[in-house]
Amino acid sequence: MVADVQSVVSSAIGGENVGEVIDGRQRFPINVRYPRDYRDSVQTLREFPVVTDKGAQVRLGDIAEVKVTDGPPMIRSENDRLSGWVYVDVRGTDLLSAVKAMQAAVQKEVKLPPGYSIGWSGQFEYLERAAAKLKTVIPLTLAVIFILLYLAFRSASEALLLMLTVPFALIGGFWFVWLLGHAVSIATAVGFIALAGLAAEFGVVMLVYLRNSLNQRLGAGYPLTKELIADAIREGAVLRVRPKAMTVAVILAGLLPIMYGTGAGSEVMQRIAAPMVGGMITAPLLSLFIIPAAWRLLQECRLRQATNLSPLTTKEQKNEIPTI
């Protein structure tokens, strides 16, 4: 009975296509329904006759409640559940902070009846998915960098030294992003990952020259002393000033067009390039000043340990040449 009533209402009030008019390449449906005078009046709809299976006529108002109410413009479902959407445009703040504030306000003020739930979708959902992936990608990237450094130097202490200097090399990237007013996003995170690789590369090149400079002196027969370590560091660090300056200039020359570019995708590319541009100030300075000083402390610590564990005479020290 309910299905019959709904069928009559949908065809008489909503209309039903009974044919089609063809005009050249155009097609026009023929829709049949009650005139507008019957459909626009609630009282007329209540008097609308409905024929039962036995042929009797009853009024629509006797078997159904006819009234005008406000409803959703369309019905949507999500995961087989009816859903309603509230669209929010965020301005003047980053997306994550805005959603966190809205979630706290909703949790405090809104009491959901049984069977109802709230979900946060849109760009925030994409941000959460990307952040979850970054929680795996970033530690994996750092682990790969450490393994490669260890394979290059065959020394866990020197690999750890370079790893510890990488976060300080990123300071310039954070300052530059802050000066530009960019919020920390997935794009900036990608830029910081690339900057970490460049900072590690700067440290590797510096450390290779320091080791080569020291090994050359040890190979020439000089005993390992603090003065020898300091002299090797001065020469090795000075040799890397010009190559590092050229490297920084080339990287900045490639990134500055991205920073000043316009067009589709420029905003995302600028947020990727911004950490690298800022990091090109702190990363080279750290590799030129901090890494040599930290490596000197590491070598002097090794020298003291070797002296305490196996003290040698002056003649034996001249004959034994350790290799770094």
Image (cartoon, helix red, strand yellow):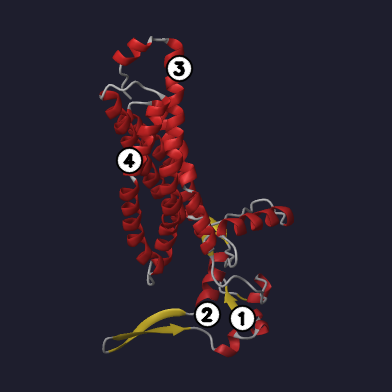
Badge 1 marks a residue whose secondary structure is loop
Q: Position of residue 20 (x, y in %)?
A: 35, 83
Which of discs 3 and 4 lies nearer the camera? The answer is: 3
- Residue type at mark 2? Ala
Dot 4 alpha-carbon crowd within 10 angstroms: few under 14, some 14 to 19, many 20 or more: some
- Residue type at mark 4? Val
Q: Position of residue 163 (x, y in %)?
A: 43, 36
Q: CA distance from mark 3 to mark 1?
A: 102 Å
Residue 79 seen from this side: no
Instruction: Pick the quarter of the image with the N terminus.
Output: bottom right
**Badge 3 or badge 1: first in the primary sequence:** 1
Q: Position of residue 205 (x, y in %)?
A: 32, 40
Q: CA distance from mark 2 to mark 1?
A: 10 Å
**Badge 2 or badge 1: first in the primary sequence:** 2
Q: Are marks 2 and 1 in contact (CB under 8 Å)?
A: yes
According to the image, label 1 marks what residue? 48
Q: Are marks 1 and 4 in contact (CB under 8 Å)?
A: no
Please tell me the numbered disc located at residue 12: 2
Instruction: Pick the quarter of the image with the C terminus.
Output: top left
Is residue 93 found left or right of 111 in the rendered image?
left
Badge 2 marks a residue whose secondary structure is helix
Q: CA distance from mark 3 to mark 4?
A: 27 Å
Badge 3 marks a residue whose secondary structure is helix
**Badge 1 or badge 4: first in the primary sequence:** 1
Q: Is residue 99 above or below residue 197?
A: below
Badge 4 marks a residue whose secondary structure is helix
Q: Residue at x 30, y 24 (%)?
A: 218
Q: Residue at x 31, y 35 (%)?
A: 208
According to the image, label 4 marks what residue? 205
- Residue type at mark 1? Phe
Please tell me the numbered disc located at residue 305: 3
**Badge 2 or badge 4: first in the primary sequence:** 2
